[in-house]
Amino acid sequence: MTNERFLTLTDVAEILNISMSQTYALVRSGELMGIQIGGRNQWRVERSKLEDYIEAAYRRAAQAINDLPAEMPSELRS
C-alpha cells in the first residue's frame, strides 16, 4: 500500500477488509465519497475521504452503543 493521495476501490476494500462489491456500493450510494476518472468506470477515493468515512463510522458505532440497554435483554441470555 502506498501513501498516494487517491486510492483504488481495491485499496479501499483491502483497508476496510470488505468485498469489492461492498466498496463499490458505498461509493455509488455516496456514503463514501469517490470520484470517477475517465470513461471506464475507474473510481478513486481520496485518502482523507476514507479517513472521514472511518471517523463517521466510529461516531455511528458509539451512538449505537449508547442506545443499547445497560443490561443484556433476557431473551439473549443463555
Image (cartoon, rainbow, N blue to C red):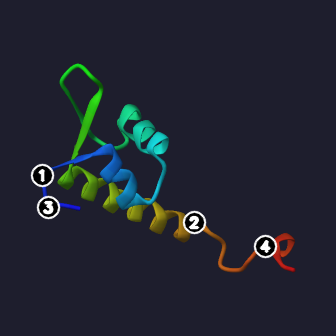
State which tag comes first along the sequence, 2 or 4. 2
1 left or right, relative to 61 = left
Q: Which mark is residue 73?
A: 4
Q: Which residue is mark 1?
A: 5
Q: Nearer the viewer, residue 30 or 11?
A: 11
Q: Which residue is mark 3?
A: 3
Residue 2, image x and y in percent? 17, 60
Disc 3 vs disc 4: Cβ atoms closer than 8 Å? Answer: no
Q: Residue at x 39, y 63 (%)?
A: 59
Check disc 1 and give the amino acid type.
Arg
* Mark 1 to mark 2 CA distance (whole Å): 36 Å
- Pick the quarter of the image with the C terminus: bottom right
Q: Residue at x 35, y 60 (%)?
A: 15
* Mark 2 to mark 4 CA distance (whole Å): 13 Å
33 left or right, relative to 67 = left
Q: Which residue is mark 2?
A: 67
- Give the structural element (helix, strand or loop) at label 1: loop
Residue 31, image x and y in percent? 37, 41
* Mark 4 to mark 1 CA distance (whole Å): 46 Å
Q: Residue at x 48, y 64 (%)?
A: 61
Disc 1 vs disc 2: Cβ atoms closer than 8 Å? Answer: no
- Give the structural element (helix, strand or loop) at label 3: loop
Q: Which residue in the rendered view is the most extreme toward the top? A: 39
64 left or right, relative to 25 = right
